[in-house]
Amino acid sequence: MLNTTRTIRIGARTSPMSLAQVARVTEDLRERYPDAGIELVPFTAAGDLEPGRQAELHDKGAFTGEIEDALLAGACDMAVHCMKDVSGYPLNVPGTVFAAHPARADIRDALIHPGGAPGRVRPR
C-alpha cells in the first residue's frame, strides 16, 4: 500500500514531452492520493546530451538508464517514461515493473496544416 502522507518522487526526463506526461501522471496521483506530496526528480538523459548517437545509445537505455538506476538506488519512487524511449527486451529492468499506464488520450488530437510542417520538404 502506498504511504500517501509522504512525498512521491517521480523520476523523469526534462524534455517537453516528458514533462507533459509527468503533469498528467501528477494530476492522476493528486486525484487518487490528495494528501501526498509529489516531487519531480529531473534527469537529462544520455540520449538528450548526445543526439547524434541516439541510435547507438538506444539499446543501452539512452533515455531511461539514468532514471532506472536512480529508481533502483531509491532516489525516486517511480519513473515516467514514454514507451518509445524504452529499449529492447526484456522491457523491465531487473528489480522494476511497468506498474501502470495512463488512459490513452483522444487519438483525434492532431494538427493538419495544408502547407505541412514548417521547414519540412514535401514529397512530390
Image (cartoon, helix red, strand yellow):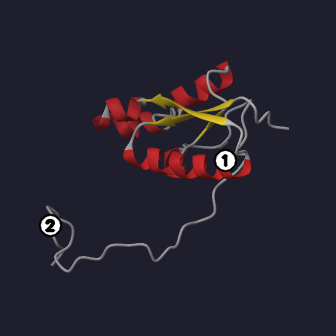
Q: Can you give x and y, in whole percent of width and height, for residue 46 in the image?
A: 40, 29
The residue at which mark 2 appears reads as 121
Amino acid type shown at disc 2 = Val
Q: Can you give x and y, in whole percent of width and height, for residue 119 in the image?
A: 14, 61
Residue sitting at 47 percent across and 30 percent down? 42
Q: Residue furthest front?
A: 35
Name the side, left or right, on which 62 lies relative to 121. Answer: right
Between discs 2 and 1, the one toward the N terminus: 1
Q: Can you give x and y, in whole percent of width and height, for residue 82 in the image?
A: 52, 49
Taking depth in this image into account, of 17 and 86 the one nearest to the observer is 17
The residue at which mark 1 appears reads as 29
**What whole-number distance in Å separates the C-alpha atoms at marks 2 and 1?**
42 Å
Q: Residue furthest top?
A: 73
Amino acid type shown at disc 1 = Leu
Quadrant of the image occupied by residue 124: bottom left
Name the side, left or right, on which 3 lies relative to 103. Answer: right
Taking depth in this image into account, of 112 and 97 the one nearest to the observer is 112
* Helix, strand or loop for disc 2: loop
93 to 84, vertically: above or below: above
Quadrant of the image occupied by residue 33: top right
Q: Can you give x and y, in whole percent of width and height, for residue 35 in the image?
A: 72, 39
